[in-house]
Amino acid sequence: MSLKEGYSSILKEISKALKGKEYAIRWSFAGLLTGGHILLEDLPGTGKTTLSKSFSATVDLSFKRVQCTSDLLPSDILGASIYNSSEGKLYFQKGPIFTDILLADEINRASPRTQSALLESMEERQVTLEGKTYSLSQNFWVIATQNPQESAGTYPLPDAQLDRFALSFSLGYTDLDDEIGILSDHQIDSPINNLKKVISLVDLDNYKSSCKTVFVSDAIKRYIVQIVRKTREHSLITLGASPRAGITIMKIGQALALFDGLNYVAPEHIKEIAEAVLSHRVKIDSQAFYGGENSNDIIKQILMDTPAP
């Protein structure tokens, strides 16, 4: 099964549980294939948990969820050594981070100390505890959520943490017809309980390898770099995107190209994903921010001002 066919199967199956959010499924699957973690910023009840659970249900991957709170400790995520009194030995009890898909719900409610515990795992896919290094799954993938409307009792994610997320976007509310359909689907049972696995681990490994072979022309690379560099030069931005952002745009673009049945990255793929890759990585001048400016609008303007090849 080609990646285009696999993507179509994933889209069809997950859409049974998450209606009207094709772009979210498309971008999330691209993130999974390229090792890019996802940050979902949205109101409660819009489908954030459903999205993450659906990928575990349709791809042969394990899933664990962590509800982040202010008293959550790093050991609650990573694990800790437990003393077995009957044997007189210490055993390492693995935490929920030892999974394929980790849902970190309301991540901004966790303390900075706990948030920092995720840094090594998100970047290196390993955990170091008490001088020992433990490897995580090669498919380790974090989907984190936060509520942008509620700030009481929260800790803003540091820049280093934000830069680890490949994509950040919102799901938003569905339109009228889709919301009526959601009510019908949940009348008897949650549709997520009836989703079928359509992608095997072998398929997943092959898809990941295929993404790396997609051709990216020098003109496209220059286009990506020009967009990224303009975030550092913009008068309203105090902190621009790093080179990692450009790498992410390129990799996500390669996956999107295969979804569309192409073996090369087109300018349209860059335009499609740039806002979701860059908006959470840049910082707006405080005066401009309180004057109504936001990073999404600035990125859109940068795309309009940058000629495509």
Image (tube, helix red, strand yellow):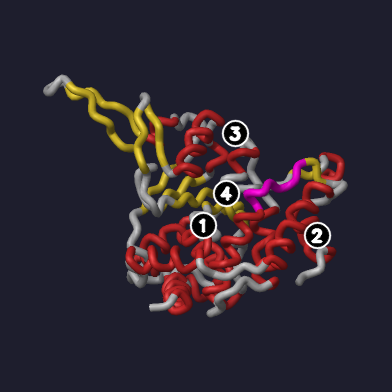
Neighbours of disc 2 within 10 Å: few (<14), some (14-19), many (20+): some
Residue under label 4: 165
Dot 4 falls on a residue whose secondary structure is strand
As shown in the figure, which amino acid type bears the numbered disc 3? Answer: Gly
As shown in the figure, which amino acid type bears the numbered disc 4? Answer: Phe
Query: Residue at point 85% right, 45% down?
Result: 288
Residues at marks 2 and 4 touching, judged by CB atoms closer than 8 Å? no
Residue 47 placement (x, y as % from top left): 51, 60
Residue under label 1: 48
As shown in the figure, which amino acid type bears the numbered disc 1? Answer: Lys
Q: Is residue 151 left or right of residue 57?
A: right
Out of 240 and 43, give the one closest to the viewer.
240
Q: What residue occupies the far left of the structure in this picture?
A: 86
Residues at marks 3 and 4 touching, judged by CB atoms closer than 8 Å? no
Compare marks 1 and 3 and give the one earlier in the sequence. Answer: 1
Q: CA distance from mark 2 to mark 3?
A: 34 Å
Query: Residue at point 84% right, 49% down?
Result: 234
